[in-house]
Image: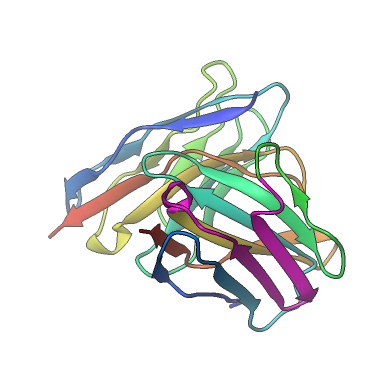
C-alpha cells in the first residue's frame, strides 16, 4: 500500500537552532500535504496545508515565519522549525493526499516526529 | 468552533475483552466522522468512517455509529486482540481536501 516516509522520527536540539522534518510519499504523487502537531494530552492540530509549487496556507495562530513549509515536488514536503524554543517541543505529523479513481481522496500519514528542544 | 473529545487513555484490557472508546463531537454543520488507528512506529491509518447520521462504519471487527442526537461516534469491538494495541484517534471532516479535526487520541493496550 501507499507509504509516507517521515523523518527523523525523533530529534533533540538546542534552543535557537533550526530543525528540518521531511515527509516523502514513496509510491505516489501527493497533490496536497498537511502538517499537524500534537502537544501532550491534546488533540492533533492542523498547522498548515500545502500544494506542490505554491505557498502553504497556515492555520490561525501558526507563525508562518517560524514554521517554514516547502513543497517543492509532488513527493516531498519539508517543515523547518526555525529558531526552535522549548515551547515548540511537540509531536509533528505529516499527511499526504492523493486523488484516486472517481475523484475519491485518500490520505496517508507519516509516523511522526517527536521534537524536543532543550 | 468544531471539536472532538475522546476518553482519556491509556485503556488496558485483557485479550478477548469488550472495547469501547468514547468519542463525542461539537459541530456547526454535518461532518463525516472517522476513526484512525496508529500502530507503534507507523503512520495513522483510516480504520472506519461514517458520512451521515445513523450510518455505521465497520472494519476489522471494529464498529462505530454516527449518533447525531448524542453527538457521539463511540468505537467498539467485541473481542480485542493483542494486535489491536495502538493509539486510536477520532476525527471529523466536512469535505475532501478539508481540514481533519482530531481528538487527542486514546492509547489501547491489550494484554495476553
| Quarter occupied by residue B31 | top right
Q: Residue A110 placed where, x, y %? A: 54, 67
Q: Is residue B91 above or below residue A13?
A: above
Residue A30 relative to residue B108: left or right:
right
Residue toward you, B88 or A88: A88
Residue extending farthest front? A16
The reply to whether residue B26 is visible in this rendering is yes
Task: Give the extent of the magenta segment.
Answer: A63-89
Q: Position of residue B23 (x, y in %)?
A: 45, 32
Please state if A7 lies on the left or on the right of B108 as rendered: right
Residue B104 percent coordinates (x, y): 44, 40
Q: What residue is rendered at 37% in x and 44% in y?
A: A40
Left or right: B70 as drawn, with respect to A80: left
| Residue lying at 34% horizontally and 66% vertically, measured from the top left | B40
Q: Quadrant of residue A97?
A: bottom right
Indicate the quadrant containing the C terminus of chain A: top left, top right, bottom left or bottom right: bottom left
Whether residue B109 appears in magenta in the rendering, the answer is no
The residue lying at 40 percent from left, 69 percent from top is A10
Where's residue A87, x and y in %?
Answer: 45, 46
Q: Identify whether A55 is placed above or below B27.
A: below
Amino acid at each position: 500500500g501507499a507509504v509516507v516516509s517521515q523523518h527523523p522520527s525523533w530529534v533533540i536540539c538546542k534552543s535557537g537552532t533550526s530543525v528540518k522534518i521531511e515527509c516523502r510519499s514513496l509510491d505516489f504523487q501527493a497533490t496536497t500535504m498537511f502538517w499537524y502537531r500534537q502537544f501532550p494530552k491534546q488533540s492533533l492540530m492542523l498547522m498548515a496545508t500545502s500544494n506542490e509549487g505554491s505557498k502553504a496556507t497556515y492555520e490561525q495562530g501558526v507563525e508562518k515565519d517560524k514554521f517554514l513549509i516547502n513543497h517543492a515536488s509532488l513527493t516531498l514536503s519539508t517543515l523547518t522549525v526555525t529558531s526552535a524554543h522549548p515551547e515548540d517541543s511537540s509531536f509533528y505529523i505529516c499527511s499526504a493526499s492523493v486523488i484516486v479513481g472517481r475523484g475519491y481522496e485518500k490520505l496517508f500519514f507519516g509516523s511522526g516526529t517527536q521534537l524536543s528542544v532543550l | 468552533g468544531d471539536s472532538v473529545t475522546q476518553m482519556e487513555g491509556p485503556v488496558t484490557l485483557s485479550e478477548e475483552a469488550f472495547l469501547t472508546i468514547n468519542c463525542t463531537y461539537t459541530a456547526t454543520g454535518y461532518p463525516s466522522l472517522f476513526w484512525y488507528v496508529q500502530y507503534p512506529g507507523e503512520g495513522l491509518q483510516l480504520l472506519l468512517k461514517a458520512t451521515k447520521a445513523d450510518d455505521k462504519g465497520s472494519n476489522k471487527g471494529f464498529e462505530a455509529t454516527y449518533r447525531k442526537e448524542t453527538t457521539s461516534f463511540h468505537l467498539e469491538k467485541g473481542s480485542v486482540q493483542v494486535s489491536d494495541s495502538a493509539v486510536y484517534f477520532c476525527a471529523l471532516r466536512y469535505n475532501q481536501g478539508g481540514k481533519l479535526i482530531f481528538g487527542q487520541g486514546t492509547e489501547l493496550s491489550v494484554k495476553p
